[in-house]
Amino acid sequence: MQRIGSALVLIVLGLIIIAFPLLGVIPFSVLTGLAILFLGVGLLAVGITSIGGNKGLGIASLILGILAIILGLGFIFIPSWFSFAAAIFVFIAGILLIIAGIAALASRIEGGLYGGLISLIMGIIYIIVAIYIKNPVYLGILIGIWLLITGILTLFQD
């Protein structure tokens, strides 16, 4: 019974986020921004306390702390920064999948053809998705579709 309730909540949330895509992006962006902001404050504190003993570590920590604070505030107040960062990570994952697919095809090991083709196809799909999720609306729609599919699969799970 609990599984059916969870599945229905996921399906409803997925439909809501598909209808209003920014509702899916903004919470992820704010939570990621807060985490990076706290990391930046911690790095800043380490940099200030380390500057007396190890100047190199102290200066590096200060610079990283300031950059992390700027990035964290950007994620919190400008959700398109989060979408851009997500697009970069998905793009890199796509490139790595394509490389892994080519390597599996070239190695000619057992199952290499099937796994290599799947990796190539998924890599191409990742790169196409990365092109579109630079826009926060498309990222929100993808999050909504993911929630919807997860809810449907949970509903029909054994």
Image: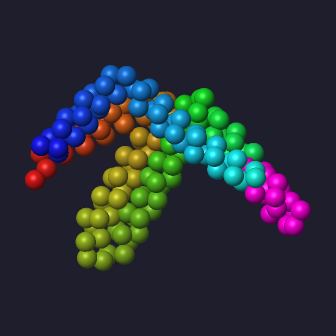
Residue nearest the observer in this picture, 9 or 137: 9
Please identify the dominant SS of the magenta region: helix
Q: Is residue 158 visible?
A: yes
Q: Please identify the quadrant where the N terminus is shown.
A: top left
Query: How far across and down, in percent of the image, does residue 124 sit?
Result: 39, 49
Q: Residue at x 64, y 43 (%)?
A: 37
Horizontal and vertical percent position of residue 36: 61, 46
13 left or right of 90?
Answer: left
The image's colour scheme reads rainbow
Depth order, front residue of 133/69: 69
Judging depth in this view, the residue of 96 and 19 nearest the camera is 19
Q: Is residue 58 magenta?
A: yes
Give the x, y percent position of residue 101: 38, 63
Residue 131 seen in this snapshot: no
Task: Look at the image and give the residue range highlighted in magenta.
Answer: 46-65
Which x, y percent locates residue 68? 68, 46
Residue drawn 22% across the image and 40% down it: 6
Does residue 38 appear left or right of residue 8 in this picture? right
- Left or right: 86 as drawn, with respect to 58: left
Residue drawn at (30%, 70%) of the image: 112
Q: Is residue 113 above or below residue 30?
A: below
Residue occupying image coordinates x 34% and y 28%: 17
Marks counted in the figure total 0
Q: Quadrant of residue 107?
A: bottom left
